[in-house]
Every structure is written in C-alpha cells, then in structure tokens.
Image (tube, rainbow, N blue to C red):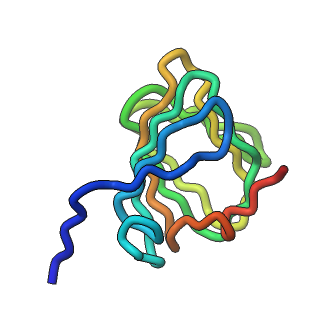
Amino acid sequence: MPKLISKPTQIEAAGEPPKIIREYVGRVNSGTPSVSVAHMKSPCGWTEPKQTPEFDEYTLVLGGMLRVDHQGGSVDVSAGQAIITERGEWVRYSSPGKDGAEYIAVCLPAFSPDSVHREP
C-alpha cells in the first residue's frame, strides 16, 4: 500500500553557518533505512567538514550553486545540474555563492550520522 509522507522532519545540520535539512524519506521521518530523500537550503558561506560516507549520494541543485570538494579538486554544481558522489570517497559540500544553494539529496542507503564519517 502506498505511504503518504505528509510533511518532512527538520534535522540538525553539520557545518556553519547552519543550513536547513528537511527529510521526507529516510531513517528519521519515514523509518526507511534503504534510501533517504531530503530538501536542503544552505546559506551563503556554509561549509561542512570533510566526510567519507558509506552511501552513494545523488544531488540535484534547484537554486544557487553547491560546491563539492573531492580528492581531485572541486566541482561547482549550478541550478538545473546534478552530481553523484560514490560511497568511500571523501567529499566536502559548501555553498560559497551569494545565493547559497537549494538542493535535493538522495542517499543510498539512507543517510545516518554513523555512516557519514565526518572529520573533526
């Protein structure tokens, strides 16, 4: 039977200044460990610690620009573009542009604080 997700759960985000995470599907809001789907809004200047997650992440940028640093350099992902990061590679997300970034993140399996492996 289909399961309606009537509203997301806002989750505390890593990084500074604070960003907004609204999880629609995932471990917290729907009890789904296999995938997470979240709507993110990060302000200008937001950055998070480097991480080496145990999940693949598919990110669709809706507005602004999201920067993804990786071992080989960095990629700027603009509105209307998407990026895939694979489990086991270190990445760091940030939104250095004046408009910040608004995006949808899909993680397989679902995001969890224990599986993201952020650096201090």
Outermost residue toward the left in this view: 1
Residue 53 placement (x, y as % from top left): 68, 63
Q: Is residue 58 above or below residue 4?
A: above
Q: Is residue 80 left or right of residue 47?
A: left
Q: How many marks?
A: 0
Where on the picture, by quarter, is residue 111? bottom right
Residue that appears at 20% across and 74% down: 3
**Front residue of 110 and 4:** 4
Where on the picture, by quarter, is residue 36? bottom left
Residue 42 placement (x, y as % from top left): 52, 33
Residue that appears at 45% across and 45% down: 82
**Front residue of 35 and 82:** 35
Where on the picture, by quarter, is residue 116? bottom right
Outermost residue toward the top in this view: 98
Residue 47 placement (x, y as % from top left): 67, 34
Outermost residue toward the right in this view: 120
Residue 6 placement (x, y as % from top left): 21, 59
Residue that appears at 75% across and 39% down: 73
Residue that appears at 72% across and 66% down: 88
Q: Is residue 62 above or below residue 43?
A: below
Q: Is residue 100 left or right of residue 118?
A: left
Q: The N terminus appears in which quarter of the rendering?
A: bottom left
Q: Is residue 88 left or right of residue 81?
A: right
